[in-house]
Image: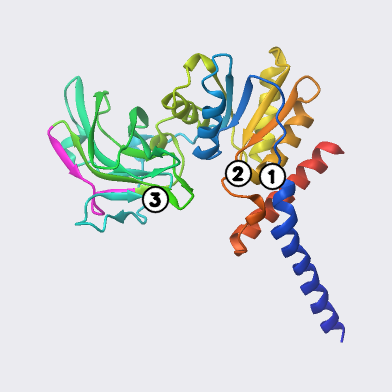
């Protein structure tokens, strides 16, 4: 009898959690409360959707100032890079190229005759195409030896994109193409297809034999030392003037990047007069973000929050993954509330 009661109690608790995660918590956690300000703080880990919407609304105002806070990427030495093979996808149409369906880097194996490439400047030509979502195509950066040498927005059909690489003393050690503005919205999906790379006179065809799909974030795969620098690069591509952007970097922590970022931003504005700011963040993460920054910098700076949900928060799917995400975000919010209140 006791076991039956215990089982019933567990089922009841799980049912309550399910109903909360499905119907109440998404509305509670998705919080939009802007203040009147031309200052905007961007959490560098948010998606391209929020960034593009914010730029559309505020980016064309010359008085707007964007502060990007992001963590530092791990530093890897090109000569010691070990590529872990994982699932790259071949185009089903005559095996043309490799599709990148999520933000990731496509690493090319470097033939021996290219590792000691000579000359002052080498022409790099990337043949690529992309798919469109929210009126914008896939964007990619070309990364050589951990340095971004340029990037471009793709088009619907294959195009050749030309870049100049100033040859370094170490030669050509690693070559990655980073796709960084993935988006799925309104039954559209932004994806990138890489067909080939021409390095000088050497053609590298993108296939599973000579490429590796890399999802880890570090300086070699991204081309930048920090997450904030990579986000700054994308803002520049969207037309924001470099003088409107300030980046703030912090050491990555195992958990609660939001709290670590807010504390670092508090240190940054200690010597800067910033009467108000709007934090740009993502859907159900927005209440935790607003509360955290409000408690940490709220005494000297009025804090607002902007989010751009791609879907109605009340229409969260009932899959275990989505519900777990909602519950995890609420627990993280509650943990910050306890830590910053008592």
| Residue 196 image point, x, y percent | 21, 42
The quarter in which the C terminus is drawn is top right
Q: Secondary structure at mark 3?
A: loop
Residue identifier under label 3:
101
Mark earlier in primary sequence (2, 1)? 1
Q: Nearer the viewer, residue 85 or 155?
A: 155
The residue lying toward the viewer, choosing from 235 and 34, is 34
- Magenta residues, start to end: 201-212
Q: Quadrant of residue 16?
A: bottom right
Report the side of 116 relative to 336 (left or right).
left
Q: What residue is shown with label 2?
A: 309
Report the residue that reaches farthest toward the bottom: 1
Q: Where is mark 1, residue-wise?
A: 30
Report how far apart the C-alphas of labels 3 and 1 lie in the structure: 27 Å
Q: Residues within 10 Å of mark 2 (few under 14, many from 20)?
A: some
Q: Position of residue 27 (x, y in %)?
A: 72, 49
Q: Distance from label 3 to label 2 (Cα)?
A: 21 Å
Counting from the top left corner in percent of width and height, residue 208 is at 26, 54
Please, which colouring scheme is shown?
rainbow
Q: CA distance from mark 2 to mark 1?
A: 8 Å
Identify which residue is drawn at 24% across, 49% down.
Answer: 97
Query: 231 and 112: which one is in front?
Result: 231
Indicate the quadrant containing the N terminus: top left, top right, bottom left or bottom right. Answer: bottom right
Vertically, is 181 above or below 94?
A: above
> Which callout, 3 or 2, points to the residue nearer the camera?
2
Q: Can see residue 255?
A: no
Q: Tell me the SS state at disc 2.
A: loop
Location of residue 275 in the rendering, given as x and y in whole percent from the top left corner? 73, 16
Do callouts 2 and 1 mark residues in contact (Cβ within 8 Å)?
A: yes
Q: Is residue 1 left or right of residue 330?
A: right
The residue furthest left is 201
């Amino acid at each position: 009898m006791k076991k039956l009661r215990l089982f019933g109690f567990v089922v009841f608790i799980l049912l309550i959690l399910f109903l909360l995660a499905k119907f109440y918590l998404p509305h509670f956690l998705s919080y939009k409360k802007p203040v009147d300000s031309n200052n905007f703080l961007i959490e560098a880990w948010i998606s391209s959707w929020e960034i593009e919407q914010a730029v559309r609304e505020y980016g064309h105002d010359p008085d707007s100032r964007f502060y990007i806070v992001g963590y530092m990427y791990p530093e890897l030495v090109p000569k010691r890079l070990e590529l872990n093979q994982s699932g790259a996808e071949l185009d089903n149409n005559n095996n043309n190229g490799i599709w990148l369906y999520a933000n990731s880097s496509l690493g090319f194996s470097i033939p021996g005759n290219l590792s000691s490439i000579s000359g002052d400047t080498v022409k790099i030509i990337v043949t690529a195409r992309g798919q469109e979502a929210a009126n914008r195509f896939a964007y990619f950066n070309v990364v050589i030896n951990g340095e971004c040498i340029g990037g471009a927005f793709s088009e619907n059909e294959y195009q050749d994109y030309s870049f100049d690489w100033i040859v370094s003393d170490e030669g050509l050690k690693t070559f990655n193409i980073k796709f960084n503005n993935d988006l799925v919205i309104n039954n559209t999906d932004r994806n990138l297809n890489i067909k080939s790379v021409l390095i000088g006179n050497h053609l590298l065809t993108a296939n599973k034999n000579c490429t590796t799909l890399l999802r880890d974030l570090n300086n070699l795969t991204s081309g930048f030392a920090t997450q904030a620098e990579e986000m700054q690069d994308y803002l520049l591509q969207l037309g924001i003037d470099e003088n409107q952007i300030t980046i703030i970097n912090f050491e990555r922590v195992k958990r609660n990047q939001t709290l670590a970022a807010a504390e670092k931003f508090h240190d940054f504005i200690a010597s800067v007069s910033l009467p108000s700011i709007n934090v740009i963040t993502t859907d159900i993460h927005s209440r935790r973000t607003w509360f955290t920054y409000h408690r940490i910098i709220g005494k000297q700076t009025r804090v607002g929050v902007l989010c751009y949900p791609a879907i109605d928060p009340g229409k969260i799917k009932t899959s275990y993954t989505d519900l777990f995400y909602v519950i995890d975000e609420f627990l993280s919010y509650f943990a910050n509330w306890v830590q910053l209140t008592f």
